[in-house]
Amino acid sequence: DLPTGHWPMFSRPQDLAASKYIYESLTEEAKASFGKGEWGGDKVLIGKTLANEMGLGVGDPISLYSPTGADSAFGNLGGLEKTYIVGGIYTSGASDYDRAYVFMPLEQAQLFFGKDGVWDVIELKVDEPDKVEQMVGPVAQIAGPGAVVTDWRNRQAAIWGALKVERVAMSIILGMVVAIAAM
């Protein structure tokens, strides 16, 4: 069973291929089987850190829970549980990411979460991530008034803040080293 605080990410096979680090870390079998079958199939991809913590390997079952579930003839029945098969284990290079995200086919996710034809999140990848602040405004305008637009700096605020502090600290240390050397 997937622990609390882990989130599925939904992807079409061709979109997964655009996630370079994740896609390249998968076996050929995992690449070929992801998204195959009725409603995208029942294979999901999990991160190496999560797989190690839960003792899972390729071919093992993993249960996912939906807080809302799909609608039925009797209305929305509330939560839904479904067992999927680990189709592959990815490594992104960031253990926090590998611990927190499960990739499942988009069609399967829409069915499982009762959101047929709906996307909750659209992720944009840019060639120059340092210039993302120039893109937030236009994207928010296109997305409309009900959309929430964030960038990597907001989602990774702790790391971004630590990098800024490190940059200042290194400047001070190097300045002191130069001052001592000059004396």
Image (cartoon, grey):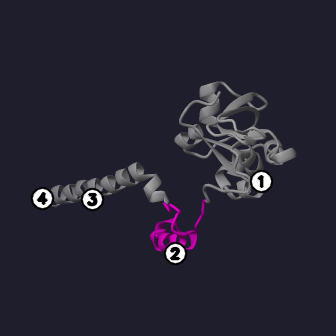
Within the image, what quadrant is residue 119 found in?
A: bottom right
In the displayed structure, 161 sits above or below 139; it is above
Mark 2: amino acid? Pro
Using residue 44 as the reference point, say whether residue 155 is left or right of it.
Answer: left
In the displayed structure, 77 sits above or below 24; it is above
- Residue range in magenta is 123-150
Question: The C terminus is located in which quarter?
Answer: bottom left
Kindly identify the residue that appears in the image at 24 percent across and 53 percent down: 173
Q: 10 Å neighbourhood of mark 3: few (<14), some, or many (≥20)? A: few
Q: Are marks 3 and 1 in contact (CB under 8 Å)?
A: no
Q: Nearer the viewer, mark 3 or mark 4?
A: 3
Residue 37 visible to an observer of this rendering: no
Residue 13, labelled with which disc?
1
Which residue bears the numbered disc 4?
Answer: 183
Mark 1: amino acid? Pro
Mark 4: amino acid? Met
Give the mark nearest the N terminus, 3 or 1.
1
Give the mark nearest the N terminus, 2 or 4.
2
> Which sits in the foreground, 179 or 103?
103
Which residue bears the numbered disc 3?
Answer: 171
Q: Nearer the viewer, mark 2 or mark 3?
A: 2
